[in-house]
Image (cartoon, rainbow, N blue to C red):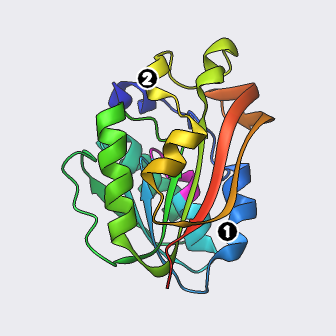
Amino acid sequence: MWNEKFNREDYLYGTEPNDFLRVASFVLNDDSKILCVAEGEGRNACFLAMQGHQVTAVDASEVGLAKAQQLAHAHKVEIETVVADLNDFDMGEQNWDAIVAIFCHLPPTLRQKVHHNITKALKPGGYYITESYTKQQINYGTGGPKDLELLLDLAEVQQQLNDLKWIHACEIEREIIEGSGHTGLGSVIQIIAQKPI
């Protein structure tokens, strides 16, 4: 499905980073080792690499990640790309200074597994940064899944990541202009969480 969606001349979600990530990245230390999950065409990974971070981008779409490498080349930065299903991908233990998930919408069972893996994979003091559509987004028609199960609930996410310390956690409406894939007012959760030292 995602290979088909990304198989186009332009970038489905544009080439600029997610607005929330742009702001949230202030918490990151210089030269952080960062994992971007469900990274698609690479806009966020490239942004982080341009800030001097070591970035690995994981996605199930080889088409998306090929475009990510093209974007990295255009920006004169290097990113590592890994084609993998998050159900099988090993994030490791205490391996990452930060993990980033922007509009990563997974089935409930896989979402819980990935949240567990994220908690385990962050180094002590490491950050988890995410923005995703809430269940209310189903009424907006401006992007995101059409399946309610794939949309997120802030309280549920906080429960699944309860080993992390909350720096920022909110549910808001905001204007999202990211390529043709996300255009217009949307309902999102935004989280910056840190693994205790």
Residue sitting at 48 percent across and 49 percent down? 159
Q: Position of residue 90 (x, y in %)?
A: 22, 61
Q: Position of residue 66 (x, y in %)?
A: 37, 49
User: Is 43 within the magenta?
Assistant: yes
Is 33 placed left or right of 28 in the picture?
left
> Which SS class for mark 2?
helix
User: Is 118 within the magenta?
Assistant: no
Residue sitting at 45 percent across and 35 percent down? 105
Is 113 placed left or right of 127 in the picture?
left
Considering the whole magenta stretch, tell me its main secondary structure: loop
Residue pointed to by mark 1: 25
Is 171 placed left or right of 58 in the picture?
right
Q: Which residues are magenta?
A: 40-44
For the N terminus, the quadrant is: top left
Q: Are marks 1 and 2 in contact (CB under 8 Å)?
A: no
Is 186 placed left or right of 40 in the picture?
right
At label 1, the amino acid type is: Ser
Residue pointed to by mark 2: 149
At label 2, the amino acid type is: Glu
Visible residue check, residue 173 = yes
